[in-house]
Image: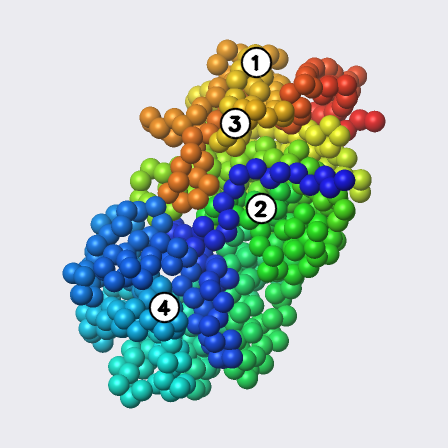
Amino acid sequence: MDTRAETGTALDASDQAGETDPSEELAGPVDPDVAADPANPNSVYPCAGYGTLPRYNTVATNRSDVYNWYVFPSTKVGNGSGNINWTLDPHRDLGWKLWFSSLRWIGPSIEAGRAGDSKALAKAETIIRDWIRDHGTSWLADSDDMEANTHRLNVLTCFREVVMERNGGRLPSSYAWLTTSLHRHAEHNIARWSGAHNHGSMENKALLGLGCLLDRRDYQDHAIARVKKALPQQVSPEGLSNEAAPHYMHFNYRLLVQIGELMERCGHDARTVIRPLTVMGNNLAHMTNALGYYWQYGDSSVTKAPSNVPAQALYAATNGARGTKPTHRVRIFDAGFVFGRSSWGTPATGFANHPSWMLRGGSGREKKAHRGDLLQFLYTARGRDILVDGGQPGGVSTKWRGWAVGELAHNTIFVPSAKMSDGGRARLTRSSLPADGRADFVEMTQQFNSRGTRTRGVLVMPDPDLAIVLDRTVINDSSRRHTVQSLWSVPADQTSTWVSRSTVRSSRPGSSSQTTFVQVPFWGAPTVGKGETVIYRGAEAGIPRGHHYPRQLVRQPTDQITFSRHGNQVGTISVIAPALKSHQVRVTRGTYSNGSTKLTIKVGAKTTVVRITRGGYMSREG
């Protein structure tokens, strides 16, 4: 019997194209594989398509000078005759402006011209000529036009390809203006390179491709020199991207693979570029949860792991149906991330029902990172998300960007009275990872501001599925008594209810499963007081709580369960138990003779005993 589980609702990776990112750069990943098949596969640098812009635009909208992108309403951007107002920015959104300036939105007319529609191609040419006429010889001073420079260059190469196809493989002399514009775009590419990250890679790829098309060795050499300069910064020795979000890691992996392939097609030795990419690609296996989705953290959206990856990552993306089982069940990276699961299953059974988890360490200052997600714990079990990240809102300058990068959007330890953004790295302090996966224990510690230290230990167990999280926070501040909170966000389709002062149950209506959250004191008062377990949902007044962005600009209310304790030395145990609704969850606390805490957790007919030493080490008994 195939035991692969339903993975719940999520959005396909192609929904991310054009994702905006205001933290450092003006645009997020435009998946290089979300495009039409190359129209001319024999070309050294064939048209790669137009991302997802053809999803929102058509020949008819192009004809009317109407531009569409993503969730925004249709916008009339010209007079109907191709005279476009390129200064428009009605929504004050970086992504809307970027893709408008990129010309990708006229892709449908270019491709219609490839299919024989001369009027559509003429409309595309009119709009291209209008852009060139309105922008003169330089747009270096315009950040929007410069950000779109590479994408627009690629659109021009697509247009050139179609014109040549319609003219026997030659570019008529009447299109000298197009060649001039391509060179001008290359000059701008050289004048401003974005550096060692995905935008820089896109610029390298476009300049190299154009150099190959036009037989400009200087363009080729310049692009390859930048690629080799950036590669050690973009891919760490252990094969991680310098952009700390799984979607961006995949995006960068694919870009670098495509650059290597382009170098080879163009007659260059690409071995130094390609060599580190297999390790990088296979690391994506660990960034894929048991449901086949990338873990959502940093500047990323809910993203299905794609299949254009090396064998180990393919196994993770396809629930074991394809590829090769990864070597490591738990992977601890020097950069601070820890990814684990109880089992990789088998090709026959899959592994979607097995628990998977991640604990976030590192600096939180990496590109695309959220400083507030340090010590975050994410968790899947029983074929569903159990704990989710808050996501990222996109190119907005409102309170939501601040919320997304802070602690309140993440499953972490939060001290409202302290400035949590100050401090050091979250570092792995100890771990115990038995071969059978029955009790994985990992612990991290981080100093925040000059007076606080917070430590999170996580024990993940299958059969029954349980996650025990021990949070210990010490604040050396005699001037006040602090509140320390453990934050837990559940999927937006679930509803949470109080069972008692210490217990919350959360489930999706109509589901046979539910997750029980139990707060157990470790340090301080022996019982949970009134108001120390709170559920927030879609709260916007004051400090936002209880929200999730599955993708940019799409915000959903969700339940955030908050366990609060008070004092300057606070220890809280969170018992997280995904189970059938028919299986009652009971947690009792006792003490061993040596002072260790004994947790007895009964889930249905199964009983699990956990020992927690005074120093915080957790283990499964028996």
Residue denoted by label 3: 494
Depth-wise, is mark 1 or mark 3 nearer the camera?
3
497 vs 613: above or below: above
Looking at numbered disc 1 in the image, what kind of residue is underneath it? Answer: Val
In the rendered structure, find residue 499 and report the number of the disc placed on it.
Answer: 1
Q: Circles 1 and 3: CB distance less than 8 Å?
A: no
Q: Quadrant of residue 144?
A: bottom left
CA separation in Å, label 4 and label 2: 35 Å
Marks 3 and 2 in Cβ contact (< 8 Å)? no
Relative side of 471 to 29, left or right: right
Looking at the image, which residue is at 30% across and 73% down? 118
Please report the residue visible at 65 percent of the width from the left and 55 percent of the height from the top: 313
Q: Which mark is residue 112?
A: 4
Q: Of helix, strand and loop, which one carries label 4? A: helix
Tell me how far mark 1 sits from mark 4, CA to CA: 61 Å
Q: Earlier in the sequence, mark 3 or mark 4?
A: 4
Q: Quadrant of the C terminus?
A: top right
As rendered, which of 146 and 322 lies closer to the eye? 322
**Crowdedness of circle 1 by 10 Å Cα count: few (<14), some, many (20+)?**
few
Where does label 2 land, which residue? 293
Do the numbered discs 1 and 4 sit on residues whose CB atoms are within 8 Å? Answer: no
Task: Using the numbered discs, state the Cα–Cα distance from disc 3 to disc 4 in whole angstroms.
Answer: 45 Å
